[in-house]
Amino acid sequence: MKVAIISDTHDHFWNTKKAFAQILNYGISTVIHCGDLISPFMLEELEEFPVHMHLIVGNNAGDLILLVKKCMERKKQVTLHGWHGYIELENRKIAWVHDPFLGKTLAEQGTYDLVCFGHTHRWYLEKVKNTLLLNPGELLGRKEPPGWALLTLDDMSIKRIFIS
């Protein structure tokens, strides 16, 4: 199984739509978003894509009340986890937060196979004890070329994918 990990979209729906098109080409149906989606209208922009997004809020939540409402309306497409997320897929434990310090702290616990974070808008990949610590970079394209991370669960390999 493959999983897409994205972060810091910051309402850049052109890059986000391009990323989701790439995600579909890889046959991915699960997306982890590490925060800063910002505006609820972004969810409407992604309705045409048959993927399930696990979303957390970041430090730029926009209209949080409307975001929660829009997520509730799209339960089959979006799961809003709040400030931190956790899922198990194929016996792999994955946690994610927006804050890099909290991400590093979670990774140091050694409880998870993968811990993801956002906020810095920069790609980062490190092995911390037995846990992979990942920032997938940004879809915004402000500090780095826009991109996302492709996770293959069977071997826990991670590949950086740039928006084309």
Image: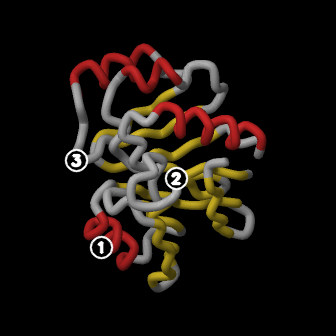
Residue 6 on image: x %, y %: 50, 49
Q: Nearer the N terminus, badge 3 or badge 1? A: 3
Q: Nearer the N terminus, badge 2 or badge 1? A: 1
Q: Quadrant of residue 19?
A: top right
Callout 1: SS: helix
Disc 2 residue type? Pro
Callout 3: SS: loop
Q: In this image, 114 relative to 37: left or right? A: right
Q: Which mark is residue 90?
A: none
Q: Which mark is residue 59?
A: 3
Callout 2: SS: loop
Disc 3 residue type? Asn
Disc 1 residue type? Thr
Q: Nearer the N terminus, badge 2 or badge 3? A: 3
Colouring style: secondary structure
| Alpha carbons under labels 2 and 3: distance apart | 19 Å
Which residue is at a point 28% across and 46% down the rendered structure image? 58
User: Pointer 1: what residue?
Assistant: 105
User: Pointer 2: what residue?
Assistant: 146
| Alpha carbons under labels 3 and 1: distance apart | 18 Å
Q: Is residue 86 visible?
A: no
Residue 133 on image: x %, y %: 46, 71
Identify the residue at the far bottom of this view: 129
Residue 152 on image: x %, y %: 70, 60
| Alpha carbons under labels 2 and 1: distance apart | 26 Å
Closest to the observer: 33 or 87? Answer: 33
